[in-house]
Amino acid sequence: MSLRVQFIALYTLVRKEATRVFRIWLQTLMPPAVTTALYFLIFGHLIGRRIGRMGGFDYAEFIAPGLIMMQVITNAYGNVVSSFFSAKMQRHLEEMLVAPMATWTIVLGYMLGGVLRGLGVAAAVTAVALVFTRLHVAHLLVTVSVIVLTACVFALGGLINAILADNFDDVSIIPSFVLTPLSYLGGVFYSIALLPEFAQRLSLFNPILYMVNAFRYGMLGVADVGLGTAYAVIIGFAAVLFAICMVLIDRGTGIRS
């Protein structure tokens, strides 16, 4: 299988995923924007006025990076898990498996589709955030790289979920009982410096904490964790999840009966 063939296959798969996202933008891009507006209205405006400043910033400004990252995580994950699981259930995934597509092409294609939706949602949510607070980017390279790497991690997580899922209930379990709690406990709405020492140590086992804080550092220049540690956690998760996806598809786990 030549590299040119793989490039054509990758381009076709990513284009299909991107077309799907932007064709139904009312379902893929608008809901995160509306949800974020409600977060800002309730937490940032009404409750934030009572809280005051946090980390040297207005509360709405402090939570803005976390809200953007939370929507990126949810939508990068949801895009891949729904797209791949639908392909599996509708029995047109086999066309890719029998085509001259390398496993890494399939994994990379779906991952990039999730990243594109994550970035599209990030743009929409950022536009909403600008209505409620001021935003500036302290470190552009950190901001862009962290949001892309985080979208990669959760797109790959969504692919693993879709591969292993046998029904629609299996698809909804992880977002409801894993992603949502970890996101809320990942420092989106608060600095872990406010927590008791035991809770601070426990929070360090939450990978989303590193993603939110690295992104907050990129935008505001402040973070509760070291930037190097955050990058190591994010890149490590991305590498491990990519390898797991490769192994599962090569073995036909959850795909070949």
Image (cartoon, rainbow, N blue to C red):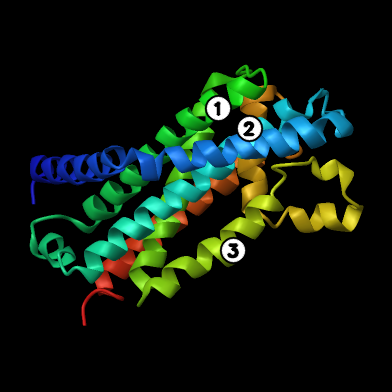
The residue closer to the viewer here, 243 or 196, is: 196
> Label 3 to label 1, Cα distance in Å?
26 Å
Residue annotated with mark 3: 178
What amino acid is labelled 2 in the image? Pro
What amino acid is labelled 3 in the image? Val
The residue closer to the viewer here, 54 or 100, is: 54
Instruction: Name the mark nearer the viewer: 1 or 2.
Output: 1
In this rendering, does residue 153 appear at all? no
- The numbered dot on residue 65 is 2
Residue 178 x, y percent position in the rendering: 59, 63
Instruction: Please report the residue visible at 29 percent of the width from the left and 54 percent of the height from the top.
Output: 107
Q: Secondary structure at mark 1?
A: helix
Residue annotated with mark 1: 128
Which residue reaches farthest bottom? Answer: 257
Residue 126 x, y percent position in the rendering: 54, 27
Residue 47 x, y percent position in the rendering: 81, 37
> Label 1 to label 2, Cα distance in Å?
12 Å
**254 vs 190: above or below:** below
